Image (cartoon, rainbow, N blue to C red):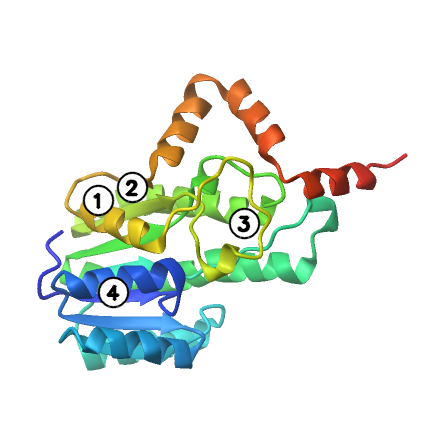
Amino acid sequence: MNIQGKIALITGASRGIGRAIALALAQNGMKRLILIARDRQKLAEVASEIETMGVEVAILALDLSKPIEVNIAVAQVWRNYGPIHLLVNCAGVAYQNSFLQSKLLQVQEELSVNLLGMYTLTSLIAKRMASQRQGTIVNVSSLMGKVAAPTMATYSATKFAILGFTQALRRELAEYNIRVVALLPSLTDTDMVRDLKLFRWVIPMTPQQVAKALLAGLQTDAPEILVGWQSHLAVWCQRLAPWLLELILEIATPPATKKQQMAEKPS
């Protein structure tokens, strides 16, 4: 995809990977960026930084878990800022708990934001892209969409679902000249993950590394963009020696969490 002079909409753009992608697109010739997140103040800070690059930017404080508000917002955005050429679904939340201690409200939030919110927005944008017979959709999954992680069951489930959703859309929307891509970063150093207990041997990436990989991937025909050597190694290990990967995950699970799980076993 040639991003020069194009218009992009990015969710989760107030921080982390979404913010880094927005800045990278601005630095590489995007004409206009439409930034969505729930925190208007943080969005405004990102927008100010982008405007100094001479790139047009609009912000929209929006909760993607509210379909009616999303529907109205997309109609207004399309009318006011022109056709969107690139949609980056980056908004997401993550909670870390052993499954036996999972909390329903947190599970519902992960499903609502990571999956249903992305589905609602993508549906509205894809229909409009189909009418203009062009567009690119990037769904941000995770390495956990390939290799499920203990203590992250619901998050992993949403990321697996995003991959399936992306694969289905890729085939369905190809006839409308719409490209659908999955971006799969490994653990990334963002606000969202700083309270998580890290797995042994996992070296967090930076959001800038993820954004750089996305830009490079958009120039190829790859249906999935794996980010970082750890992601490639884990996927190959899963294919060639799944028993070894299971062992590594067992050893790598944070010690405190393992003790917690043992305490929860019924007598």
**Distance between the Cα atoms at labels 4 and 2?**
19 Å
Residue annotated with mark 2: 225
Residue type, numbered disc 4 = Leu
Residue type, numbered disc 2 = Ile
- Looking at the image, is mark 1 or mark 3 earlier in the sequence? 3
Asked whether disc 2 touches disc 1, contact meaning CB atoms under 8 Å apart, the reply is yes
87 or 194: nearer the viewer: 194
**Distance between the Cα atoms at labels 1 and 3?**
24 Å
**Mark 2 residue element:** strand
Left or right position of 17 against 260: left
User: Which residue appears at 34% of the width and 78% of the height?
Assistant: 45
For the question of whether residue 120 can be seen, the reply is yes
**Mark 1 residue element:** helix
107 or 175: nearer the viewer: 107
> Which x, y percent locates residue 15?
39, 66
Residue type, numbered disc 1 = Gly
Q: Quadrant of residue 249?
A: top right
User: Which residue appears at 13% of the width and 70% of the height?
Assistant: 31
Residue annotated with mark 1: 217
Left or right position of 73 against 267: left
User: Which residue appears at 56% of the width and 45% of the height?
Assistant: 198
User: Which residue appears at 21% of the width and 82% of the height?
Assistant: 80
Residue annotated with mark 3: 155
> Which x, y percent locates residue 27?
16, 63
Residue annotated with mark 4: 23
Mark 4 or mark 2: which is in front? Answer: 4
- Looking at the image, is mark 3 or mark 4 earlier in the sequence? 4
> Which x, y percent locates residue 58?
26, 79
Q: Quadrant of residue 43?
A: bottom left
